Amino acid sequence: MSNGDIIVLGCGNSTGVPAIGNYWGKCDPANPKNARTRSSIFIKYKDTSIVIDTGPDFRTQINREDINHLDGAFYTHAHSDHVNGIDELRLIKYRNEKMVPFFSDLETLEDLRHRFPYLFNGWQSNLYPPVLEPHVMDEDAFGNTQQFMDIEFIPFVQDHGTVDSVGYRFGDFAYSVDMVDLDDKAIETLKGVKTWLVDAAGYNYTENKVHAHLQKIYDLNAQIGAQEVYLTSLTLAMDYKTLCEELEEGYKPAYDGLKLSFTA
């Protein structure tokens, strides 16, 4: 068994904190842990490095953490706050001198092929060659161990209200961003993880249709059994200090730059 490293590149929801116009909502601007870019994580295991989602802050995140190599990009779904930095992968391709492996479900691939065709097909001339090498996770992949270079992972389907998103398990760590609920198959996939990084943008609003609220997370983890749960996709309503004071034991808010580890 070996250890891998995780960096929370961003833990904000679709607006980020502060939102455009330097609006902080209920978050204290004096606390640097309230400054949140859009949700994304970096994972390194042995000699393999990947990113999950490339939102609009992707370049800033990668430079902030001094990450100079990526082997692949994995995606949860095609919403703009998770994909709109995808064009930056052109530079990863040029530095690696090969296509960047791209992993997603079929719906996400089809959406991004439509929105960013030049990244998959090239554009007009040899000056703009294709950048991404797509790998589709089909129905048989979900709930079963997959392999990319040194990294084993288990994708699972999540209910995000209007669409499905993809969650990922790596050893004893799992990432569930942009989800409102999990079915029995996903819960079975997650059972036994030590650390769970999970969407909590619903906060105390139990009627949220697309993001999990705190009670939902508590109820799900009663079945999953993660020892430590970090909350991500944090909104303008979710001040870091306030969360630390009100969350149950074993639950913490994430913050940009948070470093975690996993065993695989």
Image (cartoon, rainbow, N blue to C red):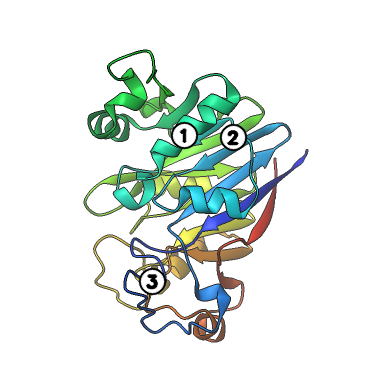
Q: Please state if 203 lies on the left or on the right of 59 as rendered.
A: left
Residue 191 in sight in this render? no
Q: Name the outermost residue toward the top.
A: 126
Mark 2 and mark 1 lie on one chain; the one further toward the N terminus is: 2
Nearer to me, 89 or 178: 89
Task: Indicate the amino acid at tag 1.
Answer: Leu
Q: Residues within 10 Å of mark 3 (few under 14, many from 20)?
A: many
Snapshot quadrant of residue 17: bottom left
Tell me, for residue 235, which label it has, or none: 3
Residue under the image location 48 percent in, 62 percent down: 11
Tell me, for residue 70, which label it has, or none: 2
Mark 3 and mark 1 lie on one chain; the one further toward the N terminus is: 1
Nearer to me, 163 or 36: 36
The residue that mark 1 highlights is: 89
Nearer to me, 197 or 119: 119
Q: Quadrant of the C terminus?
A: top right
State the CA–CA distance, disc 3 to disc 1: 27 Å
Residue under the image location 32 percent in, 18 percent down: 121
Badge 1 marks a residue whose secondary structure is helix
Above or below — where is 208 with respect to 97? below
Query: Where does the image place residue 203, in percent across and percent down from the top left?
Result: 38, 74
